[in-house]
Amino acid sequence: MSENINGKVVVITGASSGLGAETARHLSRQGAKVVLGARRLDRLNALASALGLNAKAIVQTDVTDRAQVKALVDRAVELHGRIDVLLNNAGLMPSSMLEKLKVDEWDQMIDVNIKGVLYGIAAALPHMQAQKSGQIVNVSSVAGHKVGPGGTVYASTKWAVRAISEGLRQEGQSSTARRLEAWWVCRTRVVPRHETCRPWYD
């Protein structure tokens, strides 16, 4: 993603930590104009300060709220006149066996991991169609290829991300959608312990 990224406008969800924050740091160093969204405003403020960003380049964003996702994308267009890349990165991975019936956690994963991606597409795609350019990058997972005990619902959401990305690519006149699959594991709120992911690699 760093090739020819200088001056590009990149919106990142889930940018307060983990993959989102590291991507923001990397792209900012490459000269991208990043606009960052996440729920934890304190962490966003700290990241913005470290990167020397304008305060308007961060937006407190809960991706389960369609209006907030739209506001994030609209902020990028307001600041820079366009959006070149949307990184749909926000995600959750509570782990439990289905028999535990943690339905609230299932709902959270569906709302964040699937609907959050769709809300991002709904917010960014009209701008990209109008400017006749843009890339939507959706973060999938190893779990989108292989199901393991305790990760059934999470894996289902990441299969959905793969399907959404491929469908958008097929429907578009150009390659608007891309899927980034996170093959490396880092310690974040999504994956608090690396042991959580052992089933995906067996």
Image (cartoon, grey):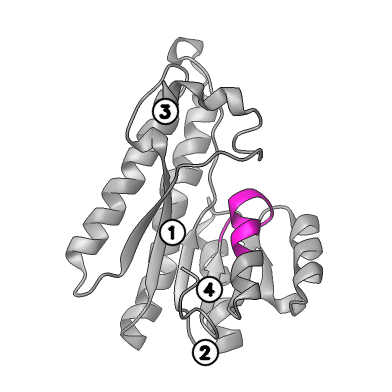
Q: Are marks 2 and 1 in contact (CB under 8 Å)?
A: no
Instruction: Give me the residue at 36% from left, 33% from top.
Output: 156
Q: Which amino acid does label 3 sit on?
A: Val
Query: Which residue does the image show at 53% across and 50% down from the upper left?
Result: 64
Q: Is residue 47 above or below residue 80?
A: above
In the picture provided, is 12 more to the left or to the right than 83? right
Quadrant placement of the C terminus: top left
Residue under pointer 2: 81
- Within-10-Å neighbours for mark 4: few <14, some 14–19, many 20+: many
Q: Where is residue 67 in the image (x, y as percent from the top left)?
A: 53, 63
Q: Mark 3 points at which residue?
A: 153
Which callout, 2 or 4, points to the residue nearer the camera?
4
- N-term mark: 1 or 3: 1
Residue 7 in the image: x percent, y percent? 55, 86
Are the residues tagged 4 and 3 within 8 Å (C-beta)?
no
Give the camera-side residue of 202 and 135.
202
User: SS for tag 3?
Assistant: helix
Question: Is 51 displayed left or right of 195 in the figure?
Answer: right
Q: What is the CA distance from the residue labelled 2 to the residue labelled 3?
A: 38 Å
Q: The disc labelled 4 sits on which kind of residue? A: Val
Magenta stretch: includes residue 16? yes
Tag of residue 10: 4
